[in-house]
Image: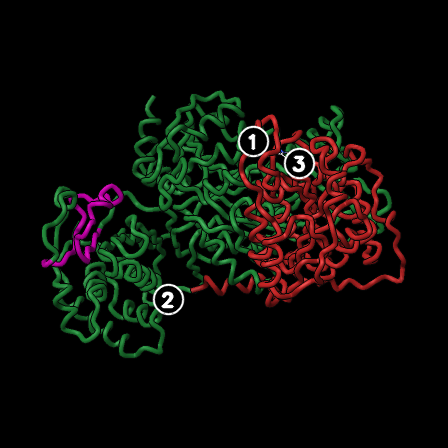
Amino acid sequence: MSASQAAEGLSIVLTGSGGAGVMTAGQTLLEAATSCGLYGLMTRSTGPQIRGGEAAAMLRLSTKPVQCPDDKFDILLALDFENVQRFAAELPLDSRSVIVADPSAGEMPAFLKASGAQVGYVEMKKLAKTVAGGRISMVALGALAHVVGLPESAIVEAVAASLGRKKPEAVKASEDAVRLGAVNAPALAVPKLRISTARPAGRWSFTGNEATGFGVLKGGVKFVAGYPITPATEILEWLAHTIPQCGGELLQAEDELASINMIIGASFGGKPAMTATAGPGLSLMTEALGLAVASETPVVVVDVMRSGPSTGIATKSEQSDLNIAVYGLHGDAPHVVVAPLSISDCLFTAQWSVHLAESLQTPVVMLSDQSLGQARVVVDRPQDVTFDTKRLTPVDPIEVYERYALTESGVSPMSLPGMAGGQYTADGLTHNARGTPSSQAQDHVAQMDKRRRKIDRFDFGEHWAEIEGDGDLAIVTWGSSTAPVREAVARAREEGISVRIIALRLISPPQPKLFEAALKGVRRALVIEQSHSGQLWRYLRAHYDMAAEIVSIPQPGPLPIRPGEALAYIRKGAQA
Amino acid sequence: MNMIQTQPHAYKPADYKSAVKPVWCPGCGDHSVLVSFQRAMAELALPPEQVAVVSGIGCSSRLPAYTNCYGFHGVHGRSLALATGLKVARPDITVIVASGDGDGFSIGGNHFLHACRRNVDLTYIVMDNRIYGMTKGQPSPTTEPDWDTAISPGGTGVSPFNPLVIALASGANFIARGFTGDVGSCARLIVEAVRTPGFSFVQLLSPCVTFRDDQQKEWKKVTHEAMVPETDDPGRAARRLMSDDGFNLGILFRGHRAPYQPKPLADLDVARLEAEFAL
Ligand SMILES: Cc1ncc(C[n+]2csc(CCOP(=O)(O)OP(=O)(O)O)c2C)c(N)n1
Ligand code: SF4
Ligand SMILES: [Mg+2]
């Protein structure tokens, strides 16, 4: 590639030790690129230290919307080399990549040398010292902007916006540092980003966790309880300051046993309710999830999955909670499990989750994950979606009331405290239609049938999956694996390989008829997912009759599935 | 605080009783708790649909279905969490929690601490029989160390704890003890507990006639009205409760802590929050 070429997109990683300001610099770079008309994505990676420690801000900037990291990084900007080898597996580079570093940073780590990447130096430390209040990260950003073709002014404005207009000296210092970096930038053969001068209208920037929070509020949630856990806490933190503005409350519970029971109580009181957690918390919640099933109390539980089992890698993604979400409850406990198909789809899927829970009076588990929740994207403003969400309540005045009446749909009118004549006791004990505890076989079966029926008969509509393309090769995937698979499918098409993609948003209940239709004419289906044991593949085998040859491609976390990896599977799958 | 308007309608205890027949053994103290509850509600003249009774699992926790109020019979040990969610979401409803010594102090012990600390306006009635009745006679955190059971032959050898002291230390705003041998007094304690804002803890000594056949007669003898009037001084209450023989009946502490009730700031259109994301 020659430097004069324009790039559709570039992947850039900024690394440095604690206090170097890597995350802020990454955030500034994303903001600057956004102001120049680009879309983008930023994910973070940090070492095990609680505070400080080495960090990597991984960005992908593009003229087209992007929802996942690319195959490799075009540019690595190292503020220093401290512990950067810790990120080796997360930072694919090759001989077309470039490394921008400080000559005083010392010996370059082996994995960087081995990549064969071109290296350019800027005296970041030295130059920063020549400006009063100048920061190394600002010099670095100036150099980087020059290398990728972003105007210095865009960086300076982004810094000013983040510092606030109140600190003119700090802004001035940054401006000078950025300029110095740009002037002293190394000459490197990197294609320049294709930018526009006007800031595009109608773009949003959010993380998957923030989008999830917004989604549940749009769905009508008025009560949230939760216990902090990585990587779900940001959902709670975002909701803590927003839900009180929308007529609701958030409580920090003493543990996840409390959070799930609190939301069941609030929902029993008539307020749509949710909690957010990760695998360890979901494990604690399973008993009460069964209570929500049996008592037919709607709740939404968002599990932002991380590498497990046990504490696993708390900061890294994996799609390995499918089993517990689907099968974790004791007894026969039909409920709903869904998964957002991209970072921005967290918004839609969270809103849909509330709709499903309220309509079906059952718990809905939404399986997001760290790679969705903690990544920030810049996207076009998502379309507004409205559901006609209404919990079925009895007609006033209530004459003879049966809370668990055996209706045809399986959904029974649910009275709320305060409604005269609607009193009943919600119960986890097997009960009859009135709600009275019963150990009679016919009551047990009738109520189980009813709870199964309401979920089986529900029309989940077109949202159950996103299906694109045709051909006799298909990829079946779900959740966060969808974005890299989609990119791989697009690339495969350019190579003349036609591939169908079936990305499941609705995991449970299974949709055998729809799935069969989606797989029609498919000779071979690859099941791509981020788990070690092929949890989706096993689930599909258990619930669907599939005429096609099914190939399981499980790839455990913590490393993301990259589009190029998915493409390699497709190429292989396309062979006879 | 329960700001429910007293209806012109006069309620009778029977208005709070459901048609469901209790599973309790004849003579079980819990029958008296149910009667006390009904009397208290009638005295408070709360419309049954404005009251929710929340419980966990145990003989004692079967109470909600026997009332004509809204009820939630949840899972073992979590009634306080469920009730907290309900009360915070629906402050207009009077929420009463029914529990046992195993449900409330063992499996639900952590929630007990935090419910006291949080001080949501709940009335927490623990029917303490110093045994796990429902699972047929295992020791609980209030069982005497030498009480012989199949799972603890010769006794646990572990001292029981004093839940009233824990409630005080954790911030409960109202602490009382009653004995089901005196239904009128128990009803009065429940009335006062509901009337007192914040978290009110009422321990009702409720004999298990099946697995603790020593209790009923003995407790009649040893229980006694508290010698000194109720106090609002936590220091004084602490001294009293620490030297308490476990059979001192009455209101033992009533404080002035404001209940926890987060209030929504506004009721804006959710769509306006998109300003958080728009560039
Ligand atoms: C998670 C769980 N563990 C154990 C049990 C079994 N169990 C049911 S009731 C109970 C003890 C109840 O004791 P207590 O709360 O004192 O009630 P009592 O029956 O004495 O009124 C136990 C251990 C259960 N239902 N759930
Ligand atoms: S076992 Fe004991 S506590 Fe349970 S109902 Fe019988 S007497 Fe009451
Ligand atoms: Mg007991």
Q: Which chain is green?
A: A
Residue drawn at x 64%, y 49% is: B245
Q: Is mark 2 within 8 Å of ligand 1?
A: no
Judged from the image, the secondary structure of the residue bearing numbered disc 3 is helix
Residue drawn at x 53%, y 62% is: A242
Judged from the image, the secondary structure of the residue bearing numbered disc 1 is loop
Of the pair A110 and A290, the residue shown nearer to us: A290
Q: Toward which corner of the image does residue B268 lie, by quadrant? A: bottom right
The three-letter amino acid code for the residue at tag 2 is Arg
For marks 1 and 3, give the one nearer the viewer: 3
Q: Which residue is mark 1?
A: A510
The three-letter amino acid code for the residue at tag 1 is Pro
C-alpha span from label 1 to label 3: 20 Å
Q: Are marks 1 and 2 on the same chain?
A: yes
Q: How is the image coloured?
A: by chain
Q: Give yes or no for contact between labels 3 and 2 (Cβ–Cβ under 8 Å).
A: no
Specify the quadrant that holds the N terminus of chain B: bottom right
For marks 1 and 2, give the one nearer the viewer: 1
Q: Which residue is mark 2?
A: A199
User: How far across and how far down the image is residue A96, in percent?
Assistant: 17, 46
Query: Is B204 left, or right, of A470 in this rendering?
Result: right
Residue A294 bears which disc, if any? Answer: 3
Q: Quadrant of ligand 1?
A: top right
Q: Which residues are magenta?
A: A75-104
C-alpha span from label 3 to label 2: 52 Å
